[in-house]
Amino acid sequence: MERSVPANKPKAFKFFNFWTAHPEFLKLVRESWDMPVVGDLMLILFRKLKRLERVLKRLNRQCYDDISSRVAKEKKLLEEQQVLNFSGKGNDEDAAKERAFSRELGELEKIVNFYRQRTKIRWLQEGDMGTHFFHSLVAMKKKRETIRVLHDEAGRKLESFEEISSEAVEFFISMIGRTDSAVMDCDMVLLRDIMNYSLLADVALLLTKEVSNEEIRLAIFQ
């Protein structure tokens, strides 16, 4: 008995609502849909939808790719323009630029928040179920937070686990008992008052009070 080779399923097309906010969206859709297609009605519908899919994917790639870096760039432009206008050196044209940067930044941040919400929704659905999605996120987080290279005070490059761990231990041991010139002295009277402070009886009682289901529900939905 021969086993058939499983076919690769194509990725499902997903329509993002923020595309409709693009000023060229309706124009692109209309131009794509109005182009003639030959065939029966079902074939015409199928081909028009496939063509429109390519148009929208191209729009997404050209206008919404690498959103995070575009947000950072737009924030920097807005901050620079605000500094110029605040210094009194700007004119009406500069004020218009600031409004334009602020409007563009707002639109980009809406898209970033949309992607974050999609990530959170998927995490709520699959995050704590021991799925491949969960384990891949854990592995990614562990890899991202791993210290692979460290330089000591002499500029020597440390790459092995033993060297990095030894340097970290020695660094924090050397900080114990060292006086930091950046830390200001504390008023002894103030420190004594703080150490002798105690909560009021009714406030202290709240710390050990049993939490009701209604309080949990309100805390979650807030």
Image (tube, rainbow, N blue to C red):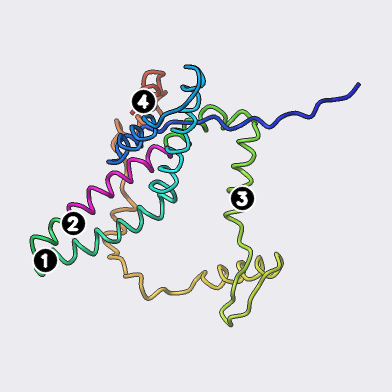
Residue at the image position 37 percent from the left and 54 percent from the top: 70
| Callout 3 crowding tier (Cα within 10 Å): few <14, some 14–19, many ≥20 | few
Observer-nearest residue: 218 or 174?
218
Q: Is residue 105 magenta?
A: yes
Residue 222's place in the image compared with 177, above or below, is above
Residue at disc 1, secondary structure: loop
Residue at the image position 71 percent from the left and 29 percent from the top: 7
Question: Label 4, on which residue?
Answer: 221
- Percent coordinates x, y for residue 113 in the rendering: 37, 40
Sequence-wise first label, 4 or 3? 3
The dot on residue 142 is: 3
Residue 97's place in the image compared with 104, above or below, is below
User: What's the residue type where badge 3 is placed?
Assistant: Lys
Q: Which of marks 4 and 2 is in front?
A: 2
Marks 1/2 in contact by CB < 8 Å: the verdict is: yes
Residue 160's place in the image compared with 111, above or below, is below
Instruction: Provide the major secondary structure of the magenta segment.
Output: helix
The dot on residue 205 is: none
Residue at disc 2, secondary structure: helix
Sequence-wise first label, 4 or 1? 1
Q: Which region is colored magenta?
A: 97-116
The dot on residue 90 is: 1
Sequence-wise first label, 2 or 3? 2
Q: How far apart are marks 4 and 3 (CA)?
A: 30 Å
Marks 2/3 in contact by CB < 8 Å: the verdict is: no
Observer-nearest residue: 204 or 96?
96
User: What's the residue type where badge 1 is placed?
Assistant: Gly
Question: Label 2, on which residue?
Answer: 98
Residue at the image position 54 percent from the left and 29 percent from the top: 12
